[in-house]
Image (cartoon, rainbow, N blue to C red):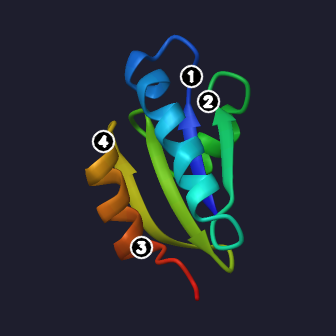
Amino acid sequence: MLVDLWAPWCGPCRQVAPLLERAAADRAGSLKVVKVNVDVAPDISRRFGVQGIPTMLVLRDGNEVGRQVGALGEAALQRWLDTVAPIRT
């Protein structure tokens, strides 16, 4: 699961949103993307120690296995996901 911690006023968050949607579609069955608005759910941000947005967390069995703070371009996002959440075949 990829948790996207974002806010509607955050420009970089809005830039990465369509890339995450594509990644979720490309990795359907292997990766689920969940969006968390930090303004609506600040307790989740505190739980994971988020200090900047966008922050993307990859969780496996409830454990954090990857964290990316800041927006990435599509190629960099795909490389990061290949490392922390490879597509299962």
Q: Which residue is mark 2?
A: 38
| Among the two numbered marks 4 and 1 on one chain, the one whose residue lies closer to the N terminus | 1
Element class at badge 2: loop
Q: Residue at x 56, y 22 (%)?
A: 7
> Which mark's residue is nearer the viewer, 2 or 3?
3
| Among the two numbered marks 1 and 3 on one chain, the one whose residue lies closer to the N terminus | 1
Image position, residue 12 (x, y; %): 38, 24
| Among the two numbered marks 4 and 2 on one chain, the one whose residue lies closer to the N terminus | 2
Q: Which residue is mark 4?
A: 72
Image position, residue 47 (x, y; %): 61, 51
Q: Amino acid at mark 2?
A: Val
Element class at badge 3: helix
**Residue closest to the far bottom:** 89
Q: Say left or right for 23 vs 39.
A: left
- CB atoms at circles 4 and 2 under 8 Å apart? no
Q: Amino acid at mark 1?
A: Ala
| Among the two numbered marks 3 and 4 on one chain, the one whose residue lies closer to the N terminus | 4
Badge 1 local density, few (<14 within 10 Å), some, or many (20+)?
some
- CB atoms at circles 2 and 3 under 8 Å apart? no
Q: Say left or right for 13 vs 3.
A: left
Q: Which residue is mark 3?
A: 84
Between the residue at mark 3 and the residue at mark 4, the CA separation in whole angstroms equals 15 Å
Q: Residue at x 29, y 40 (%)?
A: 73
- CB atoms at circles 2 and 1 under 8 Å apart? yes
Residue 45 placement: quadrant: top right
Q: Which mark is residue 7?
A: 1
Q: Nearer the viewer, residue 12 or 76?
A: 76
Between the residue at mark 4 and the residue at mark 1, the CA separation in whole angstroms equals 16 Å
| Among the two numbered marks 2 and 1 on one chain, the one whose residue lies closer to the N terminus | 1
Q: Amino acid at mark 4?
A: Leu
Q: Decide: is 31 above or below 49.
A: below
